[in-house]
Image: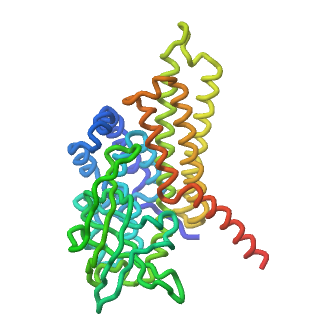
Amino acid sequence: MVTYTPEVDDDTFAEILTQINQFVRSRVVPRENEIMATDAIPADLRTQAADMGLFGFAIPQQWGGLGLDLMQDVEVAMALGYTSLSVRSMFGTNNGIAGQVLVGFGTDEQRARWLPGIAAGDVVASFALTEPGAGSDPAGLKTTARADGDAWIINGGKRFITNATEADLFVVFARTDPAPATGNGIAVFLVPADSPGLQVGVKDRKMGQEGSRTADVNFTDVRVGPEALVGGDAAVGYRAAMTILARGRVHIAAVAVGQAQRALDESVAYAAAATQGGTPIGDFQLVQAMIADMQTSVMAGRALVRDAAKAWVHDTDRRIAPSVAKLFCTEMVGKVADLAVQVHGGTGYMREVPVERIYRDVRLLRLYEGTSEIQRLIIGGGLIRAEKKKSS
């Protein structure tokens, strides 16, 4: 058995995590309502995040990142999940589904060209997979990439693309073969935002996660050279999508745990201070029961996330465990957020009260990186296929 050695040792990581927690609690939390009201991340917070290396915390050190593995990544995600989710989203794709495509599947030249800028925050990368008819299942992609000599011509449209309005680079999934004899005929391309024929739509108006920008992205005869094909191989695409989405599911599960912890903390503080008939509502047994359920859920989610991250890093389960963690934790945080509003009573329904924002923000977690329904299909189908394989 090969001994795994992380790029960042435990002592160094403990210092990094302490700094991130301080940034979240002392710099971001006090400005949550400002972020919500302006629907934007303050420039000074973005600068500080970049200076701390947060745009590249999961990018290996050889390309300028902090080099955190997924076990460390989820600890960071739980810390960042404690505050406005749009702050994490600002650099989430750089570290996650966009940056990891390059880390895992890019050529040496592609990594050297793009990853240092991504890690520094000088390049904002967007993951352009979702379409009107293809979201959790990439097999339904309609965007096409047609070979033209050694170049490619991309046509199609993407939807709900995070950071599209600020992106410098789009990691674009497109179908190169409508009816492949083998594989899925999907390739991945690196498309600079200033490419002729690429058009970004207006910023979406969403239920929550103010400060996180999403928009449609359209490609009309966008021409890219051979250096744009990720891995230099058109067959890489679908495998890249499935691998990086699975990794991202563990990260999103950790974010959900962070939000659930915040909802719990807000509820405990409120229940201890607010009174009904002169008695703190936290003295009422039914309120204690709600808080007990919230605490149990948070602890279960945290343990599950850490277990799934360990399985990923040690390559013992990179399919079922990520979906289990994502399904449980994102469903869990929805229930915890609902209980948090209930504990707060009418106060919890008011804008600028943290649990109201949390209630809206966490609803999205059950949708992206694969819906809860897709996770159930992956888990159930995977277990059945494994059993059939054993008996065949």
Dividing the picture into quarters, in which one does residue 37 lie?
Answer: top left
Q: Residue furthest top?
A: 278
171 over 302 or under it: above or below: below
- The location of residue 278, given as percent across then percent down, is 53, 7
Residue visible at 41% across and 32% down in the picture: 354
Q: Quadrant of residue 221?
A: bottom left
Residue 252 x, y percent position in the rendering: 48, 52
Q: Image point 47% across, 51% down: which residue?
A: 74
Left or right: 30 with respect to 375? left
Q: Residue at x 41, y 46 (%)?
A: 14
Query: In the displayed structure, would residue 143 be above or below residue 54?
Result: below
Closer to us: 10 or 335: 335
Front residue of 12 and 46: 46
Q: Quadrant of the N terminus?
A: bottom right
The picture places residue 10, in percent across and down from the top left corner, at 44, 51
- Position of 205 relative to 139 (above/below): above
Residue 67 seen from this side: no
In the image: residue 204, left or right of residue 123: right
Residue furthest bottom in the image: 149
- Tell me which colouring the rendered structure shows: rainbow
Location of residue 288 (image quadrant): top right
The reply to whether residue 392 is in sight is yes
| 370 lies above or below 144 | above
Residue positioned 48% across, 59% down in the render? 369
Q: Give the position of the C terminus as an image quadrant.
A: bottom right
> Is 367 in front, or is 244?
367
Q: How many marks?
A: 0
